[in-house]
Amino acid sequence: MNASEDRPVLVTGGSGYLAGHIIVQLLQAGRSVRTTIRDVARADEVRATLERHAPTAGLTFHAANLMSDPGWDAVLEGTGHVIHVASPMPVREYRKQDLERPAREGVRRVLEAARRAGVQRVVMTSSTAAASPGESGSAPSDETVWTDPSDRNVSSYARSKTLAEQDAWALARASGGDLVLTTILPGMVQGPALGPDVSGSLEVPLRMLTGRLPFVPRVSFCGVDVRDAAELHIRSLTDDRAPGERIIAAGAPL
C-alpha cells in the first residue's frame, strides 16, 4: 500500500446509488472513506443503509454542495484519491431543472480543490451519453467519440455529462500534470439497491414491475451492473493503465 492508499478516499454524492456501492466496496477493502452530501441531516439515514453491507467505522460525512465553494477544501485536505460521482440527473428535485450548471460547476470545484490539496489521482463518473456517435447511430462508440453538445437532438442530461467531462479534461491539462484524471463512462446502471431510496436509473424496470408503465417499451440500453461499475472506479485509482483514459463501462444492449 503506497502513501496515498493510506489516506482517505473522497467519494462525492454519498447518498447516491452508484456512490453507495463504491463506498461499500472501499469499506469492505479496509479503506477510510469521506463522502459529501448536501444535507448532513441525512448522514444517519445514509449510514444506516450502508452499514447493512459494510462496517462504517471508517466512514465520515461532510457537507458540500456542487453549487457553492464552502466545504470542498476542508473535505479534500489529507485525502489520497477522489472519486467524483455527484452530478444531477433529471429526476426528483432536478426534474425539468438546469443540469448543465451544477454538473460543470461541481467538476470545477472538486478538481480545483483536489489540485490544491495535492490529491494524487481523480476518477470521475461520466456516461456513455457523453460518447454518442449522433445521428449516424449505427456506428459503434469508443473512447475517442464525443457527443456533440450543440446537436439539438441531444438531451439535457447528455449535454451536461459531455460538457462536464470536457471541462474535467481541460482542467487536468491546465494543471501541468498536477491532476491525474480517469473518467468512467457507464451505460445504464442496473443492479441491487442498497436500501429503499431507489435510484433514477432503476425507475424504468421498477415502473414496469409495478404496473406504473403499463407496457414494455421497444427500447434498448447498453447496461452495466452497478457492482461492476463501482469496482471499475476503485481499480482505476491505482491501476497504472488508467491515468489519462476514458473507460466505457457497458455491455451488450439490454
Image (cartoon, rainbow, N blue to C red):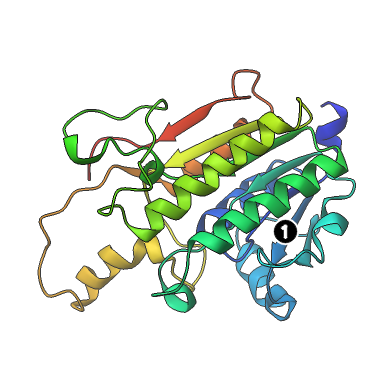
Is 215 placed above or below 85 here?
Answer: below
Along the viewing direction, whichever of 149 and 54 lies nearer the viewer? 149
Q: Is residue 106 left or right of residue 135?
A: right
Q: Position of residue 78 (x, y in %)?
A: 90, 46
Place of residue 221 in the rendered image (x, y in percent of width and height, measured from the top left): 25, 47
| The N terminus - image quarter | top right
Occupied quadrant, residue 53: bottom right
In this picture, residue 178 sits left or right of residue 171: right
Q: Read off the residue under disc 1.
A: 35
Front residue (pair 99, 216): 99
Image point (76%, 43%), residue name: 30
Q: Is residue 1 above or below residue 114?
A: above
Check disc 1: other Cα within 10 Å, few if <14, some if 14-19, many if 20+: many
Tell me the element at label 1.
Answer: strand
- Quadrant into which the C terminus falls: top left
Q: Residue at x 37, y 37 (%)?
A: 131
Horizontal and vertical percent position of residue 157? 40, 58
Amino acid identity at mark 1: Thr
Residue nearer the viewer, 46 or 40: 40
> In this rendering, does residue 173 appear at all?
yes
Residue positioned 43% across, 45% down in the render: 127
User: Is 26 located above or below residue 120 in the figure?
Assistant: below
| Residue at 70%, 41% in the rendered image | 29
